[in-house]
Amino acid sequence: MQAISEQEREAQFQAKIDRGEIIEAKDWMPERYRKQLIRMMSQHAHSEVVGMLPEGNWITRAPSLRRKAVLLAKVQDEGGHGLYIYCGTETLGISREQMLDDLLSGKAKYSSIFNYPTLTWADIGAIGWLVDGAAIINQTALAKCSYGPYARAMVRICKEENFHHKQGYEILATLMRGTAEQKAMAQDAMNRWWWPSLMMFGPSDANSPNSDELMRWKVKRYSNDELRTRFVDRTVPQAENIGLKVPDADLKYNEQTRSYEFGEINWEEFFNVIKGNGICNKERLMARKKAHAEGAWVREAAEAYAKKKATKNAAA
Amino acid sequence: MSSQWPLWEVFTQKRSGLPFEHAGSVHAPDKELALQNARDVYSRRNEATCIWVVPSEMIVSSTPDDMGSFFEPSNDKIYRHPNFYKTPGANFE
């Protein structure tokens, strides 16, 4: 075969993406495409796994058996989502072990939203409705991304997120039909989770250094601000429907664009939480480390059992 | 830190009669746990009525570089397709 230069290969790769073709694990790809995907996908997987913690906090205190069963199933789904994406990321040549090491050592990042605490039961409603609602918007876009294993994991995840989204809304809708105290609790959760949910779409387009490249590679199909606006447009009427107020004095509907305009996000808070100074950053990482260390004997026992059986089979 | 459990590819069949489809992969120390992990990860909502797990290292795949030459033999044999044949006046619907 004729040797072709790196530049030609990259041009061919870009042409393939421009034609709308999907990149598979064994296909040639620029090193930077691989690196960016490993970064994005492993962060995404870590977010699913760390995301189990704030909700897991309420499993023992769910107000009824129905709510408890639902929350257990939801948290189990989040673990499953982490596994879909970890396995997708491994196709890019990084090991599961390496990714876990990077999470536990604090090298890898995860979504800053999970560094906020879940103070009341209403927070479980707000997470399902707002946080998973924002995640659905992001993930529906990623389901059309150019990397096949990532896109396929997203299709699977999106199907399951709809349950998460609706169960969260149901929790808040129920509280909003309740006593004055319950309504206040729901509104308080709304007040605390609204802005961090908007931050989930990442920095504003003007301040998003990776975006251009990722759009050109069709890893990202829409800009951060586009997706954020889509979320606001979809969510504000849902809030109004159950009498929740959006904590944004600047929020107003623009008849011409048929879209909401909203206030400025507190970017200082956003970058501060990313840097590790959020309310729960340390607690989350400690909980993951503890779970990993306390699960060591299970992993070792399973491995020892598998070895013993393999030796027995070989002898028989 | 202990070593990483081997990787298994998971194939699921939605209903009997349908083909098996690649669902993803799991890590497991042996085939029993591979099957259980595959069930917990890829069929929490009856997505499968049957699951295959295969050690990933046992899978042999053609490579994208083969695309041209490896599949070339079928390119020039249009007579393998029914629309190659002329059957004037006859109804094959």
Image: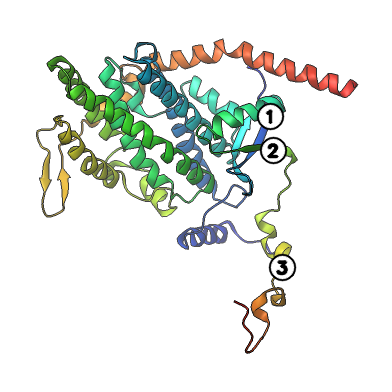
The reply to whether discs 3 and 2 touch (Cβ–Cβ < 8 Å) is no
Side of A100 where A118 appears, left or right: left
Side of A172 where A100 appears, left or right: right
Tell me the CA gap for discs 1 and 3: 35 Å
Q: Amino acid at mark 1?
A: Pro
Closest to the observer, A60 or A281: A60
In this orientation, does residue A225 appear?
yes
How would you rate the neighbour count of disc 1 (Cα within 10 Å): few for under 14, some for 14-19, many for 20 or more?
A: some
Identified at 41% across, 48% down, the residue is A214
Tell me the CA gap for discs 3 and 2: 27 Å
x and y, in percent, of residue A223 in the image: 32, 47
The image's mark for residue B72 is: 3
Which residue lies under the disc numbered 1? B6
Q: Chain of mark 2?
A: B
> The residue tagged with tag 3: helix, strand or loop?
helix
Compared to residue A119, the image places residue A272 above or below, namely below
x and y, in percent, of residue A122 in the image: 25, 20
Closest to the observer, B39 or A103: B39
Q: Amino acid at mark 3?
A: Glu
Compared to residue B15, the image places residue A58 above or below, namely above
Which residue lies under the disc numbered 2? B56
Which quadrant would residue A203 be assigned to in this image? top left
Identified at 63% across, 49% down, the residue is B17
> The residue tagged with tag 2: helix, strand or loop?
helix
